[in-house]
Every structure is written in structure tokens, then in C-alpha cells.
Image (cartoon, helix red, strand yellow):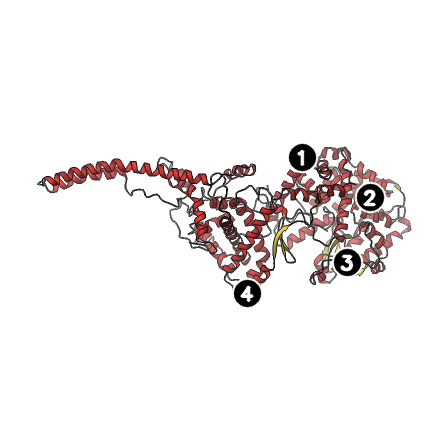
Amino acid sequence: MQHAGETDQDIHILRMSETPIELELSVQPSSQPESERELRPPPLFQLPFPTQDPSNIYQQTQLQPELQLSQNQAKPVWINHRRLFLLFLGVFLCAAIPLLICYMHHILQNRSNNQKDKVTPCLSPACQWASAHLSMSADPFTQPCDYFLFTCGSGRLSLDSGGRQRGQGIPGHPQNQREKAVWLERRGQSKEKEDGERREEKILDRKTVLLQYLREILESNDRPGSTAVQKAKGFYYSCLDTKSIETAGAEPFLSLIQKLGGWAVSGQWHQTDFNSTLSLLMRDYATFPFFNLYVGKDPNEIARGIIKRYIQIDQPDLLIPIEWNRKTLKSQAKTQTLRPFLASCQRYLALLGALPSSSMFHVGNFMSLSSELAVAAAPLDYRLSKGQLYQRMTIKELQSQAPAIDWLGCLQAAFHQLPLIEDDHVLLHNLPYIVQMSRIIGKWLNKHELNTSGPIHTYMVLNLLHTLIPALDSRFSETEKNLSVALGYTEEVAPRWKHCVLETERGFDSVLTHLLSERTAHRDAEEIIQNIFSSFKSKLHELKWKDQKSLQFVMKKVQSLIPRLWTTKQILSEAELDLLFSKVTVSYGTHSFFSNYVQLLSLWQKRLRQLLTEQTEEADILSVKPFILGDELLFPMGMFIPPLFHPSYPRAMNYGVIGFLIAKDILHLILPDIYSQSETVHAVGECVWAHYLTVTEKAGRGGAFSLSAAQQQEVWVQYSALQIALQAYHQSLKKHPSDTSISGLSLTRLFLTSFSQVNCDSDPYHEFMPLEPSFLITVICAKSDLCPTSLQCPSKTQQHSLQTC
């Protein structure tokens, strides 16, 4: 059956590409073991072999004259001659037919070999790796009975929700873990599901693949590179040098405290000015003890087409564990959570050399101040309901509302070299907290009996400690982890290389962007983006819409989008990068990583300053999913990396892997409009599900269940994405008929086999997929002459006739 959007020329091209493998499958020696023959799919083309065995024909031709003689003894002479002639003819045919079969087999084999030569093998290093990978993986065309039963859902480890997002401050605070736990709870994920997703990683999601690729770039020694590249690699290797980090111990942080004027815990504190110390922490160490700073746009202005960015002030990531009381509408700390928090604070002070006799006094003040600040904090949904987000005011107005903080001085320090004035506007996300925080600080600063102990200063130093824990020895990170476990928050510990790649990107993102751009095949990526998007638009016309206005509504939105590869407007050259990082000194030795990490924090603040002045959207190198920005549909460079994509791969492989992922991402972005306006989503979802129940023989056994709306959507999305990618590949072949192959596979078989290897890619919707995505190959191939075989399972006694969805 010809699919919509396919031309006769498309089918002719695909059939020609299929010929070598099909002919090879159709001619099998009769001595092949039965078990091996059962694993092979039924051939698409059958040779015109005789319906009877040649020996049987010979026996019948010999017995036929004898039978006739028994019936009539008296025969004319010419009949005897005819009998001799028939006997001779039978003998001739018996000898000729095997020779004819051998001759046909020889001709066919030569034709198969000649046509196989037309499918040029890909011999690049990337293709050699892909060939080895495919040879070790399940092939749906050699295992049609069970390939779609391989499970991948429970073995996946998703990093999409655990990655850092820009503008959210320094990660690692317990408060961040609590926010994530609340988010998971709102999504309805059970603890069992979380535990399942933390099992051994069997199938890598796109984020992990990207991090591994960046790791290879940082560890490569292909060429010396610029000084900026060498500094980025030097930082990465100093992060990997855990031996030196352990040897340094707490000494680097203790030396830093002395530069800040000491602190009361050690008995040596120079009574530094509160606002001066706070400004220093914000400028040089990206530490914000009392409030958070980041840069962003005003949603009210975005709706009007204004893209100006503002300084945004939010409540901080508090170290003390708190919970929201919905009756009193206040945050509070419970005794069972305060005990492990108290123990962790004591442990930190002990690691920093504090005497046990005095540490309890300082810890008590720290917890008391933390508790007072926590009461004024509120969760995001509450602040949203109260309209406390994006409240605009000038710095001068903010100063009058919260006078304990020198707002202009602190903001000028955090955004060094920017000409900020009192009349500049900022956006507040919890003004009641900011006001209360100012009152609390003023009260503690005016407690004369506590001036010698400096609880406000100690509070800032302990916040700085949490910022620098990633650069300290494992005793500090273990203390932090133990607190999280005691509070019920357990997270998978990432391998050291992954942690170091993420830290390197935080400071040297422009360097990694340059290196990634050098290795990205921009033209090939743009071509596959355009072809998939064109196929996607064709797919929309095939859907059954509620009315013509519905189609016009969706098509108007789609036609307004401009798909393109997402890169920065101007990727810096090596000379520009060297100038940008000219003041950065990457050191080596016992204290090297701590020193390098402190410079990274300064670079992080520099990035915030750039975001405030630059109005163009900066490309996020860690992004792996497309998104809509204005009238542009942007695809990050991080999507087009090996093993998901390579310019030397056969196009069949690229379209079967990254083409499918692109199509799936586009459908998810446009899905709400399609689902609300089209009737096809439900129908196709149920049709695919009916295929699954029929082939797996679950129908009628009581194990079948109806799909929810979300499951119907996800089945339709992935099935449609596979159709879109296949159609886009057909169009690509129409423009460029030649394509290479891997392992001698035909083009369509390589496309579908490649798809079956990556369909377990992790995304936010995978929990709604009720069947293994590889099974979609069976549905695609149902009554389709484009697939190598019909993918019927020969071991089943009953074959089902499947309709085309």
C-alpha cells in the first residue's frame, strides 16, 4: 500500500535499494538448521521455483507409460514411437530442470552481487563503530518474535530534571533538593518509580550522551589549541585530580577566611563591615546568603515583544530544612529535621578546626538566625497566587523598603563595571521576605551583647562554605550527603568526570561552544532539520480535523515558525577567546582546584553581567531539546553529536535516529494544539494499541486495558514521528538517490534497525508510553511493501492480518 506523501519514484528508489538483501534472504540452502531458519523473516520476493520436486517429476514420467500399457496392450507402432519420445523427453527434463535451477540461481546471485555493489559501504571510523554496535544489538528483522518485548523504561536514568538551569544560583543546597522532591510529588511520581529510574544506566539519554561527548573533547589531544582551550582543559583535569584535593583538606578554605578578615569561630575576627563583606561575597564568590540574584526578562514585556533583561531579586536557597504550613501560611522547621541539620553544622565546624566547647554556641546562633529568615520564605505556588512575582521597583524604592542592605553598592559589586544607578528598575519575587529579612539583619546587628561573636558574619561564612564544598575534600561533600539522606532526599552520585564536565562548562561555556561548533556539521544538521519540518507539515494535512478552521489555526502557527540550528549570533574565534580569558590563571598542584574553582565563580558572575547587557539569546551548550523562541524553532547543537548523528553516517541511520527524535520533539511542542483540534490522535493511538494486543496475544486474556488520553497521545506522537522521519528520508533519497550502508543492510532496514536502537531515549513523556517503541516497526511494516519483510513471527501458529494505521 502506498503511504500518503510517497511517490512512485520514492517507492522505486527504496525497492531498488532493498533488492540486494531481499534476494540474499530468499535463496537459502535446504540444509540450513530448522531453528536458524525460523529466526529469518519471510522473504519479500519468492523465486519461481517448481511446485514439485524434480525427483517426483522423474518418477511420475516413468510410471505414466507403464500405467497406460496396462490399460491397453494393443497399440499402433507410432504410439510406441510416441512412448519412446515421451520417455526421452522425461529423461531430458529430469536432467535439464536441475541445470536450469542452478543456472537461474547463478544468474540471480550475480545480479544480487552486482546490485549489492551499488550500495556503497560506509567505512569511516564512525561507521565502523556503528557497525560493531549494531552487530551486538537486537535486530528486529532477525528476531521478529521478541524484539519489541525488550524493556528499557525501568533501566533508564534521566538527567533532564537534575541538570543545572541558568540563572538559578549555585546548585547543591538542600533547599534545591527539597524543591525537586516537591516537584516530583506534584507530578505524582511514586518512590518506587524514582528508585527504578536510579538503577544501573542501560540506555543513555541525550543529556548523558552530550556530556560524554564534551568529555571526549576535553580529554582529546588532537592539537594544542589556543590558550583559552588549554585553560579549560587544565581546569577539567584539576577537577579530576581528587588525590590533590584530598591532600589539601580544609586548608584552602581556612586561608580564604583569613582574607575575609577571619571569623569569630576561630577567635580571630577583625570586625569587618557587614555590607562590605556581603558585596565581596557576591562579586568574587557568587555567594548570596540573604537573597538570590539572577538575570531575566519581564513576562509582561515579553507579551508586548520587549526582550529587555532585568536584575531579579528572589529569596535565597536556605540551608536550614523547612516545610510550608498551609494552615498558618508560614514556613517552619520541625524537630526531627533540625537534629540532623544541627549535627551537620557541628561537623562542618569540627572540620574547620573549631573547638567543641565553643562550636555549640556558634551553631546555636546560626540556627536561630536561619530559623528567623526561614519564616519569611514562601513556596513558589503561594507567591504566584499572591501576585508576588515580578514586582517592579527602582533600586531607590527598594532601599527605602529594606534599608539594612546597601542595595546599590551590593548590586554594583555583583554586576561589576556596569553603570547602575538608583533609578534603575529591578524585579522582586518575594518583597515581604526582603522587607522582613532587612528587619532581622538590623535586629541582629544591633544586639550589642553579640557583637563580639559576629553571628551575621558567621552566617555568611557558612554560606560561602556551601558554595565551595565542590572544591573541598570528600569529608565536606559526605557531610552534605548525609544530611540529605537523613532528610529523606537521596540522589544518584554522578561519576567524577560528569561532575567535572558540568563545572568546566559553568566557567568556560564559550570555549566549549567554540569546540562543539567546530565539530558540528552545520550544513548536514540544517538539512535534516528542514526536511523533517517539511515532512511534519505534510503530516498535518493528512490528519482528520474537526473542521477547516482547525487546520488553518494550527497551520498558521506552524507556518510562522522558522526552524534553524541554534547557535550564538557570533561564535568567538580562538583569538577572541584568548583575550576573554587572558586574566584567568589555571594553576596546578595541591591547592590547584580550589584556586581554579574560585576563579570559576568569578567567571560565573561575569556571565550574569553579560546577560544583563546583551539582548540576544545566548545558546545553552547543555541544551538537548528544541524550543520555540518568538517566531523561531531552535535546535541546539548538542542534539547533533555522535552516536546519535554523524555527517559520515549513512543518511538512513541519521534519519532513523536523530530524524525521529527531532520529529518527536516537534510534535510534543505543537501537541496541545493538534490534540484539541484533530480526531486522529485518538484513532491512531487505539489502532496501534490494537496491533500490540493482537500480536502479543494479550487480547481476550483479561490483561488488556484501555489507554488513557495521555497514553493515546504519546503512542500517536512516537508512531507519527517514525512516519515523518521515514517520509523525510524518502524525500532526501529523491533529491540525492545515492546513500551508503552499514553491514550490508538495505536502506530501509538500516533506517528501521537504527531507530530500534535509540527509541528508549529518555524524555518527560516516556512514562506515558504503554508499549516498547520498537514495536512501531511492526505497525509501520503492516501491509507495507517498503519494509524488507512483513515482520510476522514464524513461531506463532496463528498469523493475524493487521490493518494499516
Can residue 555 be spotted in the picture? Answer: yes
Disc 4: CA contacts within 10 A as few (<14), some (14-19) or many (>=20) = some
Of the numbered discs 4 and 2, the one sitting upstream in the chain is 2
Q: CA distance from mark 1 to mark 4?
A: 56 Å
Please name whichever residue, 737 or 187, is drawn nearer the observer in this view of the structure: 737
Displayed quadrant of residue 506: top right
Q: Identify residue type, mark 3.
A: Leu
Question: What amino acid is labelled 4 in the image?
Answer: Ser
| Residue ranking furthest to the left | 74
Label 1 or label 4, whichever comes before in sequence order: 1
Q: Position of residue 596 (x, y in %)?
A: 76, 39
Disc 1 versus disc 4: nearer the observer: 1
Q: Quadrant of the N terminus?
A: bottom left
Lower sequence index among marks 3 and 1: 1
Return the residue at label 3. 428
Q: Which mark is residue 584?
A: none
Give the residue number, with chain letter if any, for mark 1. Answer: 223
Q: Nearer the viewer, mark 4 or mark 2?
A: 4
Secondary structure found at label 4: helix
Report which residue position mark 4 lands on.
550
